Image (tube, helix red, strand yellow):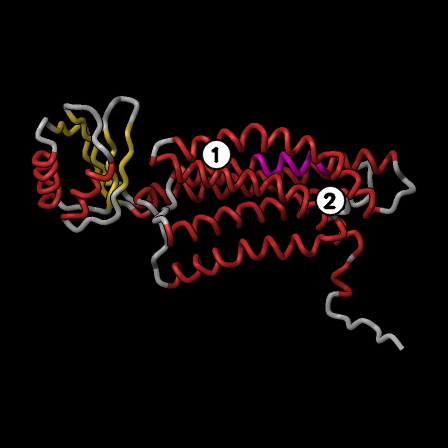
Amino acid sequence: MNIIKRRYLFFALSLLIILPGLVILIYQAVQDDLPLSIDFTGGSLLEVRFAEGVPPSEEIIAVYESLGVTDTQVQPTDAGTILIRSSYVDNELRDQILTDLQAEFTSGVEVVRLDNVGPSIGRQVTSRAGIAVGLAALAVVVYITLAFRGISHAFRYGVCAIIAMIHDVAVVLSVTAIGSIFFGWQMDSLFLTAVLTVIGFSVQDKIVVFDRIRENSNILRRLDFEPLVNHSIIQTLQRSINTQLMTVEFLLLALALMGGVTLREFAIILLVGLLSGTYSSIFIAAPILVLWEKKEWRTWFKRKPAIA
């Protein structure tokens, strides 16, 4: 199996997945219509307890929509209450919502908490997460460069791991953008948690593959770099399949299919992100390393010599 030989096919496949979603995100940004939840844009938070259990989320959302609030999110809590997030509602609309909830659920509705959420909290969390990711990426490059210092061009391994990590984040963003069009998905705090989790798993997978390349570089010194990398990838295939597909992916798939509505989006995004992390470790990170080693960009725009 020669995976490295078909590297440009895998690059094209990744672009086919990433570009449509990024185009959607750019268009939404231009239209000032990014799919952000109130965790980032601000809004109202209402926590209520129903006397007779927890009603279906669709019924609560229908009450809000009847009053013109179309971005409602409903989330059950472990305390038996319901968290209802929406865009900002004034006092008059809030009272009308509570009246309609009381009329819809005649058994009784108790208001536990009512707050207005400011967008500054979302911006602060996002900026800190960005700083944390940047510092972690720098630490990964430094760590791999030091750990792989016994082989030539150790710095490249760290840079390729970060490039593949960016690939995985781009896949998650693309899938979320497409989901916002077809399923009404929004970027909330759980989305940020999923992205950070994907980043952690992604870097871990790349280090495993690169470490096998490093070991084989000392053992198979006479072998050319491209077949050496391909041989190393084949050796790590079983490990990647066993640890990702057979454990984490199946659990997330079960959560996406049978979990609650509020966790379904999170589970699907995490499922796609971790699958992308495994894919990019094999088909993106190592091929980019070969491309860099052979400096193939020098021949990208050159015409092939005509055959007489």
Residue 29 higher or lower than 237, as above or below: below
Q: Alpha-carbon neighbours of circle 2 within 10 Å: few (<14), some, or many (≥20)?
A: some
Q: Nearer the viewer, residue 176 or 137?
A: 176
Q: Which residue ends up furthest to the right in the rendered image?
A: 222
The residue wearing badge 1 is 253
Q: Is residue 141 left or right of residue 28?
A: right
Query: Residue 235: image x %, image y %?
Result: 76, 34
Q: Secondary structure at mark 2?
A: helix
Q: Which residue is mark 2?
A: 155
Is 2 a magenta residue? Answer: no
* Residue 197 horizontal side relative to residue 82, left or right: right
Q: Which residues are magenta?
A: 201-209
Please tell me which residue is depicted at 47% across the width and 38% down the height of the picture. Answer: 194
The kind of secondary structure the magenta stretch mainly shows is: helix
Q: 10 Å neighbourhood of mark 1: few (<14), some, or many (≥20)?
A: some
In this view, the residue farthest toward the bottom is 308
Q: Position of residue 240 (x, y in %)?
A: 65, 33
- How far apart marks 1 and 2 lie (CA) works out to 36 Å
Q: Residue at x 51, y 39 (%)?
A: 132
Q: Quadrant of the N terminus?
A: top right
Helix, strand or loop at mark 1: helix
Residue 10 higher or lower than 136, as above or below: below
Q: Which of 125/23 is in front?
A: 23
